Structures are given as structure tokens and as C-alpha cells.
Image (tube, rainbow, N blue to C red):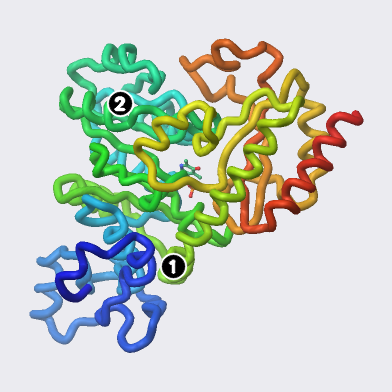
């Protein structure tokens, strides 16, 4: 981007301008979809030169991308304060695994936040273990236990904020600082807030991972992930991704770029709507807890206010003393909320979840809660009218309570 004004440009503007240099877009607004495996060289000398320089933005072979993917990477890097570069992956999970494989080797120990995304846990317990990496789960709210979990072989810490499903907000700058002091690299899954809501690298993390499938795509029609980092770790990420053969299709990159342009307004609208719905739920007698960091009084709200500049439409609530059948009556009666995995699309979703199978050391139901208050629902609030969504939920609760 031109001129000295660049550093003052705000995130909302970067969403619009990122990755649109003439090199990528030519004289049209959006970078075209470059479908290519083979890039042709003028002569043998050019071919040999191409092999030698493994740089971003240079044609070589389709696996290293073409202008459509480069434009998306550049737009994401511009959006992430402190990032030197961004590597794209075919899914959010591929980004998590690709980043972990970039920083770990056999014999290392990985610390994994107990409230990390379930497939992240499975990767630690599965393929990483098979390749000789040990893991320990830790409660990210218990700093003493976390500090005690380090040993000489601890080389990386996998964090996520807010916690998957249960939405705890940990003191990420403090956890990242402890990792750095102990010589471990910290990775954070920032899919919930994106770079718009939480500047992970500026808060001390080394590598930030985002499932673009969610807010960036935003339309429930693509799968992709990204990992961004400063110079040192970016090089490692890029090398590992090249060795693992990761590449994303230019069509999907183009869709992700399209989603990115409107992500700011979507997140603002979804956040406002989610907050209104969270308040409505918190006032209900049949709801025991609302797990929504954006809601004043909800767990994690203070840290969210301190560290975050935005939220999104994803949060959870726990039913008061109801069983699974009651929860299913509620969800099945909803008409505007789809039932399904993923989130961050323009359409609202509801998902029943059980925490016990996906935690090793964090307590559930939480300390101080009634033992019967354990059946939870996660909502992804989309772009529908807020009052319509509340009316739909009202019908769901009526069906639950009639049963
Ligand atoms: C969905 C999700 C992922 C994985 O993204 P996919 O593109 O579905 O592989 C990673 N982390 C979090 C927090 C997610 O919600």
C-alpha cells in the first residue's frame, strides 16, 4: 500500500484494501482466480533461477500458490499486527497441525490447554504422539499448575481463547510470557475473535492460527486455515507447509478474500445480536449459566474487556437442572437455527454439547455450580433479525418445558 499513511490505517480499512495491489489484481477490483499447476518459464536459465529462489510472490509451481492465494495471505498478514507472513492451509485443523509440526520434534513435550478445540487434543493424543511428541493437558486458568507443568523438554504451548465450547478467557499475555521465559513457543487458536478482535502476536504469542472456515469465509461454503507469525516462526511455518505439501485452491482463496471484505460488519452485527440474546437468556429461570465473555458479569468478561477489541456471535449456555431429552426438545423445536458443526456463517446454528469427554483436568460442572446444571447448548448467532431469533428460542424453550 502506498505512502506514509499506511501505518495509521485502521483494521476496517485494511479489510477492504488488503491484498489488492496491482501485482495481484491488475486493473480489476478483485484478484482473478489463477488456476494453475504448471508455471511456464521463458528458457532453461529462468527455470534454474526459479528453483533457486523460494520467495513469496514468485511463480515456481502450483504448490507454492499463485496471485490469488498470495493476495489472501498478504491481506491476512496486513490485518495481523506483528505478523511477517501468513501460510494458508486446506482447513483450520490442517493449520493447527501444520504449525505444531513446524515447531516440534520427537522427544519434545507439548502443553495443551485443556479447553482447546477437541480435534487439537486428538492431534496431540494421536499423530503427534505417534511421532514421538509427548503432551500434557493443563488448566489455563490455573497459572501455578501451568508453570509447574513445564519441564526441560517442553518446547511448545497450544492455547485457545476463549476456550472451545465452555468459553473461558485465560490471561493469554501472562501464559505466553511464562512460555517465553521457559524457552517454549506459544501458539494460539484465535478463530473466535480473529485479528480484528484480538491481536495475538502483540499480546505475546509467537504463532496465531485461524480457521478461515469460520468468520473469514463467513458463508458456510469453504474450508481453510491460516497461521501467521513474525519473521522467525513464519519461515519455519512456511518450510513445514512446503514439506507437508499444503496448498489451497485459488477458487477457495477467492471466496475467502470475498468473505474477508465484509467480515468487520458481519462480526459487529453478530456481536451485538449475540449480546442481546445472551442477556435475554441470562434473565431466564430455566438457564443456569450463560458462557459469553462479552456479557457483563459472565466468566472471563474482565479479561475480555482488557485484551479484546471485538467479539463474535458464538457463545454457550447451560440449562438449569434439565436432562438431555429436554435439551433436545429445545433444539429440535428451533426453526431459524440450524443444527450442525462449524460456526461463523451468516446463518444461525445451535449445537448440544457435553464437556466431560473432551476435558482431562478442568472441572465440569464448574466449581460452585449445581451438579444437575451440566447440559449445555452452543449458539452461533448469524445475521438474522435479533428479535426473530429470540422469538425462535422462546418457542424452543416452550417445547422444552412442555415435555
Ligand atoms: C472449526 C475450528 C477449527 C478447525 O477449522 P476447520 O476448518 O473446521 O478444520 C479450529 N479451531 C477452532 C476453535 C474451531 O472452531
Give the quadrant of residue 49: bottom left
The dot on residue 238 is none
**Label 2 environment density (alpha carbons within 10 Å; few <14, some 14–19, many ≥20):** many
Above/below status of 278 relative to 290: below
Judge from the rendering whether residue 201 lies leftward or rightward of residue 368; answer left or right: left
**At x 52% / y 14%, what residue is drawn?**
363
Position in image of residue 7 (x %, y %): 20, 63
Going from the N terminus, do you reach mark 1 or mark 2 first?
2
Q: Nearer the viewer, residue 55 or 234?
A: 234
At numbered mark 1, what does the secondary structure look like: helix, strand or loop?
Answer: helix
How many numbered marks, from 0 up?
Answer: 2
- Residue 129 visible? The answer is no
Position in image of residue 211 (x %, y %): 44, 49
**At x 28% / y 50%, what residue is drawn?**
228
Question: Quadrant of the image for the N terminus?
Answer: bottom left
Q: Residue furthest bottom?
A: 27
Q: Mark 2 points at which residue?
A: 110
Position in image of residue 14 (x %, y %): 33, 65
At numbered mark 2, what does the secondary structure look like: helix, strand or loop?
Answer: strand
Position in image of residue 293 (x %, y %): 50, 35
Q: Nearer the viewer, residue 179 or 289?
A: 289
**Label 1 environment density (alpha carbons within 10 Å; few <14, some 14–19, many ≥20):** many
**At x 15% / y 50%, what residue is drawn?**
231
Q: Name the residue under label 1.
A: 261
- Residue 152 visible? The answer is yes
Q: Distance between the residues labelled 1 and 2?
A: 36 Å
Q: Which of 237 and 171 is in front in this view?
A: 171
**At x 73% / y 30%, what residue is drawn?**
284
Question: Quadrant of the image for the C terminus?
Answer: top right
The answer to whether mark 1 and mark 2 are in CB contact below 8 A is no
Amino acid at each position: 500500500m502506498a505512502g506514509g499513511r499506511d501505518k495509521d490505517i485502521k483494521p476496517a480499512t485494511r479489510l477492504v484494501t488488503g491484498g489488492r495491489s496491482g501485482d495481484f489484481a491488475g486493473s480489476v477490483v478483485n484478484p482473478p482466480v489463477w488456476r494453475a499447476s504448471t508455471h511456464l518459464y521463458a528458457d532453461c536459465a529462468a527455470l534454474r533461477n526459479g528453483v533457486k529462489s523460494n520467495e513469496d510472490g514468485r511463480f515456481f509451481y502450483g504448490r507454492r500458490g499463485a496471485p490469488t492465494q498470495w493476495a489472501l495471505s498478504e491481506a491476512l498478514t496486513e490485518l495481523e499486527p506483528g505478523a511477517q507472513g501468513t501460510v494458508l492451509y486446506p482447513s483450520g485443523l490442517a493449520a493447527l497441525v501444520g504449525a505444531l509440526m513446524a515447531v516440534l520434534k520427537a522427544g519434545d513435550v507439548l502443553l495443551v490447554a485443556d479447553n482447546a478445540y477437541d480435534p487439537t487434543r486428538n492431534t496431540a493424543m494421536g499423530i503427534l504422539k505417534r511421532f514421538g511428541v509427548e503432551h500434557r493437558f493443563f488448566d489455563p486458568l490455573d497459572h501455578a499448575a501451568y508453570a509447574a507443568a513445564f519441564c526441560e523438554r517442553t518446547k511448545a504451548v497450544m492455547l485457545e481463547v476463549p476456550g472451545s465450547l465452555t468459553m473461558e478467557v485465560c490471561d493469554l499475555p501472562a501464559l505466553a510470557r511464562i512460555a517465553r521465559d521457559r524457552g517454549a513457543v506459544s501458539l494460539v487458536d484465535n478463530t473466535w475473535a480473529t485479528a480484528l478482535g484480538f491481536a495475538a502476536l502483540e499480546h505475546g504469542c509467537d504463532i496465531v492460527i485461524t480457521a478461515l472456515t469460520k468468520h473469514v469465509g463467513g458463508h458456510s461454503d469453504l474450508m481453510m486455515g491460516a497461521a501467521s507469525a513474525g519473521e522467525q516462526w513464519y519461515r519455519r511455518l512456511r518450510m513445514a507447509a512446503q514439506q507437508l505439501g499444503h496448498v489451497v485452491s485459488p477458487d477457495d482463496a477467492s471466496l475467502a478474500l470475498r468473505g474477508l471484505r465484509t467480515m468487520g460488519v458481519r462480526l459487529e452485527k453478530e456481536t451485538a445480536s449475540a449480546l442481546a440474546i445472551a442477556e435475554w437468556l441470562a434473565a431466564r429461570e430455566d438457564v443456569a449459566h450463560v458462557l459469553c465473555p462479552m456479557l457483563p458479569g459472565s466468566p472471563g468478561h474482565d479479561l475480555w474487556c482488557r485484551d479484546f477489541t471485538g467479539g463474535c456471535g458464538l457463545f454457550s449456555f447451560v440449562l438449569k437442572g434439565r436432562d438431555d431429552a429436554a435439551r433436545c426438545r429445545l433444539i429440535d423445536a428451533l426453526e431459524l437455527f440450524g443444527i450442525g458443526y462449524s460456526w461463523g456463517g451468516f446463518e444461525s446454528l445451535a449445537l448440544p454439547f457435553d464437556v466431560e469427554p473432551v476435558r482431562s483436568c478442568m472441572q465440569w460442572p464448574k466449581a460452585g455450580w449445581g451438579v444437575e446444571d451440566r447440559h449445555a447448548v452452543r449458539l452461533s448467532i448469524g445475521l438474522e433479525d435479533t428479535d426473530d431469533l429470540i422469538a425462535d428460542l422462546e418457542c424452543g424453550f416452550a417445547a422444552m418445558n412442555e415435555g
